[in-house]
Image (tube, rainbow, N blue to C red):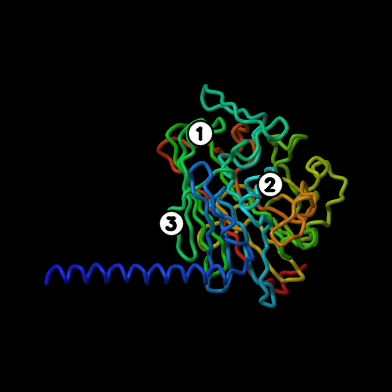
Amino acid sequence: MKNFIGTFLILLLISACKEKTKLENKITTTTVLSLKSKISPDDFKAVIDKDSVNFYVLRNINGLEATFTNYGQRLISLYVPDKNGKFKDVVLGHATLKEYVNEPKGYYGAVIGRYGNRIAKGLFSLGDTKYHLAVNNNENHLHGGNLGFESVVWKVINQTSQSIEFSRLSPDMEEGYPGNLMVHVSYVLTDSNELKISYRAETDKSTVVNLTHHSFFNLKGEGVGNVNDHLLMINADRYTPVDAGLIPTGELKEVQGTPLDFRKIKAIGSDLESDFEQLKIAKGYDHNFVLNDSPQNNEGLTFAAKVIEPTSGRKLEVYTDEPGIQFYGGNFLNGKIIGKNGKPHLFRGSFSLETQHYPDSPNQPDFPSTTLEPGNIYVSNCVYKFGIVDANELP
């Protein structure tokens, strides 16, 4: 009798497992079929250097949808509504994993590290030790080097319907950086239509860290014209001027009286053709702005920037605890790359707003430090908040 009961329980358990598997398969199928994105999740399933790559979806109660791959921790698509409730994908990207792997360093939607932005000549010192980094941007080091955080597979250690957390151990001397650096990055898609990004890192040796996110936004939709008619406000009185190699000179200059004055909202393209040396050097906007300390939101994060697309009514606000934000106007896109929706990524067809410390801080003693010591924890936060513009916000 006991054997019969035992066998019956085992069969019942097997049956339950089968039903659970059927339910999981049904949920997976439904999820794929109901994606706003037309991307096939199967095109993001692979094994790279023995690590599994996959496709992940976040949704909030309002229908916003964000999709990710753990290759380079990339935001693939982000669907947000316009003033009429119509959803469009507002970030540039590729339709397949293969395109990301073969991408010529476009950094689409990726996490950037160990050091976002440039380090002059790929050199910096900590104490008496000089470190040599990969030189991958003319004579300088850019965005972590030849094999930065955008080009490796991350572990997914936690996921819910509205959040995902990635982690990775960057080994000592990877791309020339000292210390074993343990990194955690989490994304939360809130019901307030915020994409919250939180970074955390620890090291066993003195090192430098400056992590950021590198989505290319177009609030009209991926591939829909250029962004020169988007309205932009940046909460900064000063910026860090650069030399011909886009390395900061060490000065903090006032934006007042220059085309870099975005303290009052204006069209991105309104001053692009100005006879201003900094715009000529960068072929447009590609500058770090020194953020003001206030105002702050209820989480203590500083309001950094606001972008409005007048036709769709979409609005993006950026909040951070970082001292700077890099505004990049898509100057190096040329239409040769075709995006997820079959449209080319045009010259100035997108913008990036990267919250971060200043470029070349390890070589600039007057800039806020990016040094991380053992026993300390690197923490950084960025919020991209989406909404619909009010009439009183328009100039």
Describe the element under mark 1 as helix, strand or loop. Answer: strand
The image position of residue 309, as x and y in percent, is 74, 66
Tag 1 or tag 3, which sits nearer the N-term? 3
Label 3 crowd (10 A; few <14 / some 14-19 / many >=20): few
- Foreground pick, 233 / 201: 201
- 193 vs 279: above or below: below
Q: Which mark is residue 106?
A: 2
Label 3 sits on what residue type? Asn
Residue designated by label 1: 207
Q: CA distance from mark 3 to mark 1?
A: 27 Å
CB under 8 Å between discs 2 and 1: no
Q: Nearer the viewer, residue 45 or 343?
A: 45
Q: Earlier in the sequence, mark 3 or mark 2?
A: 2
At x 62%, y 69%, the residue is 36
Tell which of 70 and 356 is nearer to you.
70
Position in image of residue 67 (x %, y %): 57, 61
Q: Residue furthest left?
A: 1
The amino acid type of the residue labelled 2 equals Gly
Specify the label residue 246 is tagged with. Answer: none
Q: What residue would you read off at disc 3?
A: 158
Q: Residue shown at 48%/35% (left/top)?
A: 171
Local secondary structure at mark 2:
loop
Asked whether disc 3 touches disc 1, contact meaning CB atoms under 8 Å apart, the reply is no
Picture quadrant of residue 252: top right
Closer mark to the observer between disc 3 and disc 1: 3
> Is 270 placed above or below 284 here?
below
